[in-house]
Amino acid sequence: MPKEPLKRPPELEHTPANCHAREMLARVGDKWSVYVIHVLGDAGTLRFNELRSRVAGISQRMLTVTLRGMERDGLVTRTVYPEVPPRVEYALTKLGATLRQLVRGLVQWSEAHLKEVDAARAAYDARNRKPVKPTSLGRSAAQLRARPARVFAFVLAAATLFTGAAWQSVDAQVARTTSAPLDVVLVGGRVMDPETNLDAVRAVGIKGGRIVSVTSGVPAARDTVDVRGLVVAPGFIDLHSHGQDSINYRYMAHDGVTTALELELGSYPVAPWYAKREGKSLINFGVSASHPGARRAMLDGDSTAEGADVISATGAFVRSPIDPTRLPQLERRLDAALNEGALGIGMGINYTPAATREEILRAFGVAARHHVPVFVHLRSGGLLENAGGVAGVQEVIADAAATGASLHVVHVTSMGLSATPVLLDLIEGARARGLDVTTEAYPYTAGATFLQSAIFDPGFQERQGIDYKDILWASTGERLTAESFERYRKQGGLAIIFSIPEGAADQAYRDPHVMVASDGGFQIQNGKPIGHPRSAGTHARILGRFVRERGVISLMDGVRKMTLLPARRLERVDPDMKRKGRVQAGADADLVVFDPARVIDRATFEQPAQYSDGIVHVLVNGTFVVRGSNLVPGVAPGRPVRGH
Ligand SMILES: [Zn+2]
């Protein structure tokens, strides 16, 4: 990556003095340059308008589209719209990305938005009834598509316009765009924001994929939606979602989930995982660097299993230790995956029992160096003194303390069983002494995993405190016997394990720091979803059973555990998460609108593939994915959540 020293383009000398703007210059080959400025906080609304008024022929919408595209392609990280008209805060980033990626991203984005830009340009011209000096902006989409270099020139031009290089007075245009209607306004709903504790009837205005206003008055919008009697909350963020495909995303959307993250087991490698989903996803998505995946790639030369599928595989990676002299190789693989944007390191130590304590410690060291969390399924769960849930937590808290890595313990109730309060005490105590340790639970008394995995190695009954009859074979619904256990274990497939005591989830959720995460993910067999009901019903179950019916936690606490807490868990690895988990001006318009009197899970162990009830509307980045309780066809507004 050729890196130029920062220079100040001469155009910026015209920037209003009190508008604190900074710029960066990236040289593309010897030919093209891209200028992007970022206007920092003290620029203020007025300042931004002054700046914008100097930009000729570029509408507010075009400007927004331009910068959103650049944001999506990793050129700018933050665009904050705290009010209408927006104040904008851009931070340029990703100059460390390869040049090739930069160009490809810009071109892809440009092509996707050319029609919009052309239309906006034409509309502007028509309004002003005067020819606009031709620039590459004025060229047709076809011309631009035919010549990729021109596409790039368009981006250059757009960025240059923003710097104020092509000044023309467009005050009238600015006045019009300032009063232009919003995209969507949700009116009359009970808005709940778990960060400010706002719980009041407000109108939520949305424009350009963001919440731009939360007000008592109702702003004009192209799409005004009456949500009286319903709760408007931030979309749910599921930190522990193995179902990372279009079928699973539909079930999750119907459960109010707007961001699904595979953090427990992650994936390895990471870049193809993101590439496969970009531009095609119903909801936002993200992944961690898979420790078992990296281990498998190293020991078995196989990295074909994506995400959680790795634990259904067999090979040396499960039961072969790595000689300490070779551990740096494993560390380098984890380094590489984190450099590809992974949100942390995911570990399923229980599934790779040969991973030594030293190996796990070294992996924590990698996470610490990258300032990312470790998401961990403990080495052991259950009640045995030397190999139970308490021992499992003690290992990883020690590693976090020794390395400085942040730690997130997954599904605390299925590891702790009746000792769940002891695990919670360990975690709370570590946090009270300054360690960054968090945990989560799913709201069920059964877990699920692959029967062929190491978790069911001999002695599982004693370790987990269960017998064959406590295992349900997901594809047929039958309870197992010694005979069918052996048969199905050879065949391989998903098993549901009834091992968690009633009350363990209540104990976990009463702790204000414990998050809700589903650990869900249907296996798709012949197009049919097979598996645990948590894949479809976790979030509505919290709202319906734990909040409304049983009063275990308040509605605001329930919302917070599914929104703000998971967003905060990731803010240090991805600062964009500061825009999620909130209903505030400036936040991403990821929203769920539900009926608090009716919301309930319908997925059961017998019939898990059932949408939740009472989730009325779901928006992802300002686009409806569920509307009037129905899935909206043909939309893919989900975006990657990445570390940077
Ligand atoms: Zn797990």
Image (cartoon, helix red, strand yellow):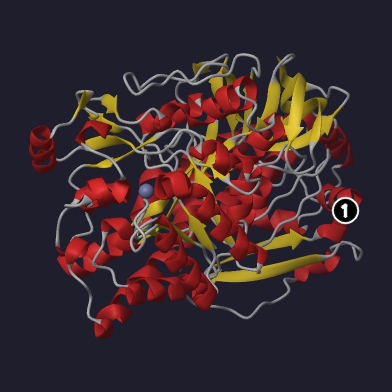
* 530 on left or right of 247: left
Towards the viewer: 516 or 641: 516
Choose top left, top right, bottom left or bottom right for residue 17.
Answer: bottom right
The vertical placement of 335 against 61, above or below, is below
The vertical placement of 405 against 343, above or below, is below
For disc 1, the marked residue is 44
Residue 86's x, y, as percent?
A: 80, 43
Quadrant position of the C terminus in the picture: bottom right
Residue 15's x, y, as percent?
A: 84, 63
Type of amino acid at the residue the image marks with label 1: Gly
Residue 267's x, y, as percent?
A: 34, 55
Furthest-bottom residue in this view = 325
Q: Name which residue lies at 56% across and 41% down.
A: 507
Furthest-front residue in this view = 385
The vertical placement of 401 against 447, above or below, is below
Residue 136 visible? The answer is no
The vertical placement of 393 against 96, above or below, is above
Residue 451's x, y, as percent?
A: 20, 42
Choose top left, top right, bottom left or bottom right for residue 528.
Answer: top left
Query: How many numbered marks appear?
Result: 1
Towards the viewer: 105 or 343: 343
Q: Name which residue lies at 65% across and 33% down.
A: 553
- Classed neighbour count for the residue bearing mark 1: other residues with Cα under 10 Å, few (<14), some (14–19), many (≥20): some
Q: Name which residue lies at 20% across and 52% down.
A: 459
Circle 1 SS class: helix
Towards the viewer: 561 or 172: 561
